[in-house]
Image (cartoon, rainbow, N blue to C red):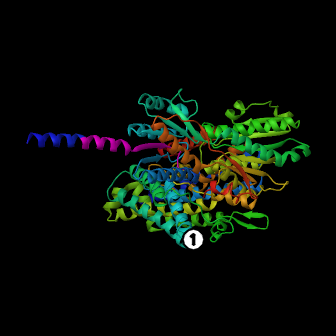
Amino acid sequence: MKKALSLLLVLAMVVSLCSIAFAEEAKTYSFEIVSKGFQSTYWQAVLKGCQSEAEKINTEAGYEKIKFNMVGPDSESDIAVQVNMFESALNAKPDAIGLAALDVNALNENIAAAQAAGIPIIGFDSGVPNAPAGAVLANASTDNYAAGTVVAENLYTKIKERIAAATAPVRVGEINQDATSESITNRGLGFIDKFIELAAADGFKVAVIGNDKYVGDSKGEKAAEADANVIIEVRVPAQTTTELCATEAGVVLNQPDTIAIFGSNQVAAEGIITANETLNLCGSDDTQIIAVGFDSGTVIKAAVTAGTMYGAVTQSPVGIGIKLIDLLLASANKEPVQDTDTGCAFYTAANIASDEIAPNLYD
Amino acid sequence: MIAQRKKMVPQKVGLQQLVIVGVLIILFTFFCLMSASFRKYTTLITMASYMYYIMLMAIGVTFPLITGGVDLSIGTGLVCYSIVGSYLMRQMGLPIGVAMAVTVGMGIVFGFINGVVVAKLDLPPFITTLCTMMIVRGLGSILTNGMTGVWPMAGQEGSWVRDLLKYKIGDVTYPVGMVIILLLVLIMSIILNHTRVGRYIIAIGSNKEALKLSGVNVARWHIMAYVISGFFAGLAAIAYACTFTSITPGTGAGLELDAIGGAIIGGTAMTGGSGSIVGTFLGVCLISLLKTGLPNIGLQANWQQIITGGILIVAVTIDMARRKK
């Protein structure tokens, strides 16, 4: 009897030890991802990237290793809503949090709370710039400043002869949906800074007017409006909606001296296309206004294919989603993580269907 | 008593409408003088295009406002209905006629729901329609799996619907949508002032108890006011989809404020009992003029909002003062 009992006890201990070991191998991870919203199909593509990578990891592991919950406010103006979502995400006690902040300052307190609770934060898309030191371990994102410079380079190449031949100052519009998020401000500033640099190299003077944030933060030598060869007019609507972007774009397109216009994200670019529906001023010809945009989506793709929009820069939203899941998993396992630039490329009607560009475009 | 009030209403509202016409002329002249780009024909077309969906919402919401209520669900509603319409065409391959019918049908259904809750369950219209606003905001995303809505673009099957609002002959674009709007203003004005449904809706706003005591089925006409609002939200959904390139699910909150603001500026009393479709038309024209004109004179976006809000306060103050006399 005693022997049987001891044997049973030993067996029970062995089984529980095994199950602990087994449980450690079958560890599951739960991640919370707070995005800037589902406002454009761009975020749907990021979600797809997350889903495909999570599925791939779960299939390889043979069980549901990763679970994630992606949320976002309805509009990219809903800063307060995102703060609440981040708080809820924290309360769910995830293994790691992914974050694309609408307004970094509004989230600083909650980020500090995450840090105190030992929950690693991975930034994606615009990430979380100026976060408290050590709070955000890495970012999976496009280098937005570099993306802005890519637009400027391609646009400048297209219009520099027109600038040289002009007898009066010409205008280049820039429509940014906001002046607070890292992605938009960096693209806008990247564009302005690069444009000034390229123009100065050819002996042209550039003035920057309009929204105070972009005028104040742009680098390079800026001329007064009266002396400039090129006037970059930066307009930001009161809210991040297509109709307000369209109104601002319309104002710039209507100026008689406008020769080019840049919309720094899908909403702004679609605003330009909407405004152009009535005005019919944009195209790829040297007599028309050269419009350039950002991201893709059905409308922008159609406009670029038709030549109404000369070109646009695409990010790799699916790539961002994939990298985000990888970084979340690594950070949850306390492995070292690093910023990952997921890249961007300029596309026009000529290369929109190419192998390099097509997979990154979405509807 | 009701007949007397009805007689007084057209006179009072008429004066307010004249004031708005005066303000419109002054502002229009001001913007033309201050901005060369505002003076262009295309600016008028653009202003008209961006006005259609607000105008349709405003015509519809005038009816609940006249009953002393409000319909806050029209903004998020129009986005929801139009993305569902888009989903039916793009993902399910259904013809545009079906999509349009479903879009407007959804507006009618939610209008009916609003009406029943307000009229039968006696819940305050503000809360009721606020709840519907939140429900439809999420519903659109759920039904379409979060897909952005895009209605047929130029060259695609079904793009004729965009021609209903803007028709191009050669190089010139004609704002044919204005003809449709003016027709609707005329029809709804007649319905409001010369049919039983209109008179009862006004009576609900001015003296609901008296109407009930006179043996009228008040609930039926009260519901009708919200059904009209929902129907026009459905029409506004189509207009919005035809004007803008894509529709993002979950947006739309705030669009109703332009419509409600337009109706109130136009003379519809917030307390109910009086209103005018012509006044609503003029009120929305004023808001649209400000929205188009202020950016053109170089004002930064936030100043535009401050000025538009200021004008709305002045309009409401004048309305309240007038009614106190």
Which residue is the extreme one toward the left? Answer: A1
Q: Is residue B45 left or right of residue B14?
A: right
Give me the residue at 41% from left, 44% from top: A30
**Dividing the image into 4 quarters, which one contains the N terminus of chain B?**
bottom left
In magenta stretch: residue A36 = yes
Q: Is residue B198 visible?
A: yes
Question: Would you say B193 lies left or right of A289 here?
Answer: left
For this rendering, which residue is in front, B302 or A124? Answer: A124
Taking B181 as reference, is A347 above or below it? above
- Counting from the top left corner in percent of width and height, residue A242 is at 62, 51
Q: Estimate the x, y position of residue B297 in percent, counting from the top left.
A: 73, 42
The residue stretch that appears in magenta: A14-38
Q: Nearer the viewer, residue A106 or A140?
A: A140
Q: Position of residue B109 (x, y in %)?
A: 43, 64
Amino acid at dot 1: Ile
Q: Residue at x 49, y 41 (%)?
A: A328
> In terms of image quadrants, where is residue B135?
bottom left
What chain does badge 1 belong to?
A: B
> A31 or B241: which is nearer to us?
A31
Against A55, residue A19 (above or below) is above
At horizontal 58% and vertical 42% (from top left) the residue drawn is A125
Mark 1 secondary-structure assignment: helix
Tag count in the figure? Answer: 1
Compare residues A307 and A7 and report the one nearer the observer: A7
Q: Residue at x 44, y 63 (%)?
A: B227
Residue B72 seen in the figure: no
Magenta-drawn stretch contains B248: no
Place residue A361 in its image quadrant. Answer: bottom right
Residue corresponding to mark 1: B96
Q: Where is residue A204 drawn, in percent x and y?
A: 87, 37
